Image (spheres, rainbow, N blue to C red):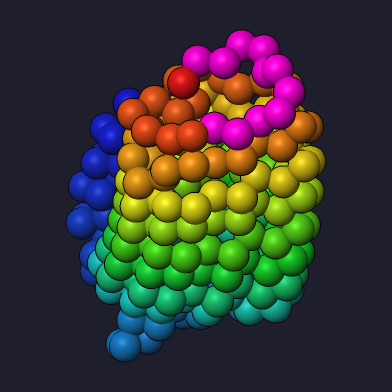
Amino acid sequence: MKQIYILLIALLMGLSANAEKSGTCGPNLKWHLNDDGVLTITGEGRMYDYSYSNSAPWGYFGVKRVIIGDGVTTIGDDAFIGCSSLTSVTIPNSVTIIDRYAFASCSSLTSVTIPNSVTIIDRYAFASCSSLTSVTIPNSVTTIGNSAFSGCSSLTSVTIPNSVTTIYDYAFDGCSSLTSVTIPNSVTTIGYNAFSGCRSLTSVTIPNSVTRIGGEAFTNVFITIEQPKLIRNIRV
């Protein structure tokens, strides 16, 4: 289902390739895209949410760099989904939420630094960012949503901060290059298929705090799981 959704977005993006060069993207936010593909967002407050039927106004295929100004508080649904030429994004300390599908299928994005103001990385936020090799998740983040990093096939390591209590379903599904993951003592639940298809993982240490691992959380992963206490409901 998610693949069909992303394909529909990409089709509609092609139709918007000749979009205007400036406009509004929130009640108090403005955007400008220059000829070099640099998209700048300025102002204060939240960004609008977008969808496949109401896509963001900038021409997706022309966006190479995104600079989000200090004062912006959210990155909206589908804001940059399918920006296949996007290589760099600057997220300020004012942003608290990265909404669903915000950077999904940004296939040229290689790294991203999430500031310590962000508390929620919503579902599919970075799904299918196939060139993403590294990501910094700060201790402010409390929620890593369903499929937030699914399909990030170049991601090699990730440290989950000790502010997170639940690793949601499919969070890192299909991260086939992931060789290292650090799960902190704050985590109590590892969701269904959370690390399925992470075939480069060879070992993982699950802390004593974890009391439930969802079905098929480590499907197609040949690993040694170290966890000194009995965990209920394990299917790997």
If the image is split into quadrants, where does the N terminus sit?
top left
- Residue 85, horizontal then vertical, whole percent: 28, 70
Residue 227 lies within the magenta run: yes
Res 111 quadrant in image: bottom left
- Residue 222, horizontal then vertical, whole percent: 37, 33
- Residue 195, horizontal then vertical, whole percent: 46, 35
The residue drawn where x is 71% and y is 37% is 207
- Residue 100, horizontal then vertical, whole percent: 53, 44
The residue drawn where x is 41% and y is 51% is 178
Res 39 quadrant in image: bottom left
Residue 40 lies within the magenta run: no
- The answer to whether residue 83 is seen in the rendering is no
- The answer to whether residue 113 is seen in the rendering is yes
Judge by depth and name the residue closer to the eye, 13 or 162: 162
Most common SS among magenta residues: loop
Judge by depth and name the residue closer to the eye, 175 or 49: 175
Res 24 quadrant in image: bottom right
The residue drawn where x is 61% and y is 40% is 205
Relative vertical location of residue 154 with respect to residue 233 in this rendering, above or below: below
Which residues are drawn in magenta?
Answer: 225-235
Judge by depth and name the residue closer to the eye, 68 or 222: 222
The residue drawn where x is 43% and y is 76% is 88
Q: How many marks?
A: 0
Relative vertical location of residue 177 with respect to residue 143 in this rendering, above or below: below
Relative horizontal placement of residue 131, taking residue 48 as reference (left or right): left
Judge by depth and name the residue closer to the eye, 19 or 171: 171
